[in-house]
Image: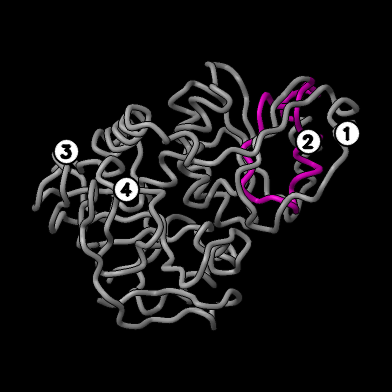
Amino acid sequence: MKAVFVTEFGGIEKLRYEEIATPAAGEGQALVKIDYTGVNFIDIYFRTGLYPAPPPVVLGMEAAGVVEAVGPGVESVKPGDRVAYAMARGSYAEYAAVPAWQLVKVPAQVGLDLAAASMLQGMTAHYLTHSTYPLHPGEICLVHAAAGGAGQWTVAAAKIRGAQVIGTVSTAAKAETALAAGCDHVINYAETDFAAEVKRITEGRGVDVVYDSVGAATWEKSLDSLRPRGMMVTFGNASGPVPPFPPLTLSQKGSLFVTRPTLAHYTSKREELEWRASEVLNWVQGGLFSPQIFKVYPLAEAGAAHDALAARLTSGKLLLQP
């Protein structure tokens, strides 16, 4: 089968698109023929070595497709089932052997492209707004990169929870996308000091929580955007990792809370995975939110997808198609 992988870490020039052995479904696994693969920043982190893994590393953490075969002990899925998954590395390929417990069945009304575009970012938005800082009606959150794939999902999930949403974007076109996704207010941080604008919108109070996938570039002003005892949720590194900081900073800025969560810890049990995935796919099926697919690239062009994502030239989800 064809796959995209790295044997050395670095830029997109390190990506290799070559023939490798098709995996077999082992104990507790299912072999999935992949129709669509989601492209996410975590793929870039594995490519560059920011997230360490022993090479060769087949990239990709998310996909949707059809079960081709199952290994011993698998009863939850069968050949022919339409399935989707996230947080099992190796989806930049034509086939993947995936732990069966991580697979969820895709409703007949949901296309496999939408399913692949929903799993990682949709469940991330779910755990952020339902578990890490469970939003309540009337609370106010700040969502960075609100026009991106994860941003649009987080905005939608926050609105489902009854919260008000302030989104940040980098261009006027992205501001329109963020408003369409449900933001109550949008700030173009390329033109405006977003912390000062947040304080103006909230009449000096600050927001209850910041959901920040950007990282280093927005860190300091995100802290300044919070109310006393508010929570800073830093869950991505699009502009680079957050720098080290003295904990005393948190007390000086209002006895703040900071957390650095990851989806793996919020889907580590089957029951929790099913809860999050079923709600996300039900949102899609019911029309509460439809992920915007910005572009579908051939698998061989994974490097171009990485470049577009890293340059923040996209609004919505990028997919690969084997």
SS category of the residue bearing label 3: loop
Residue toward you, 106 or 136:
106
User: Could you say whether the residue bearing mark 2 is in a helix, strand or loop?
Assistant: helix
Q: Give the range drawn in magenta.
A: 201-228
The kind of secondary structure element at disc 4 is strand
Disc 4 and disc 1: Cα gap in Å? 39 Å
Q: Residue 252's image quarter?
A: top right
Type of amino acid under label 3: Ser
- Residue position for label 3: 76
Quadrant where the image shows the C terminus: bottom left
Between 208 and 236, the one nearer to me in the picture = 236
Compared across the picture, whether 207 is left or right of 295 comes to right
Closer to the observer: label 4 or label 2? 4
Picture coordinates of residue 291, whole percent (x, y): 37, 48
What amino acid is labelled 1 in the image? Thr
Direction from residue 232 to residue 200 in the image, left or right: right
Q: What residue sits right under mark 1 in the picture? A: 249
Q: Residues within 10 Å of mark 2 (few under 14, many from 20)?
A: many
| Residue 203: in magenta span | yes
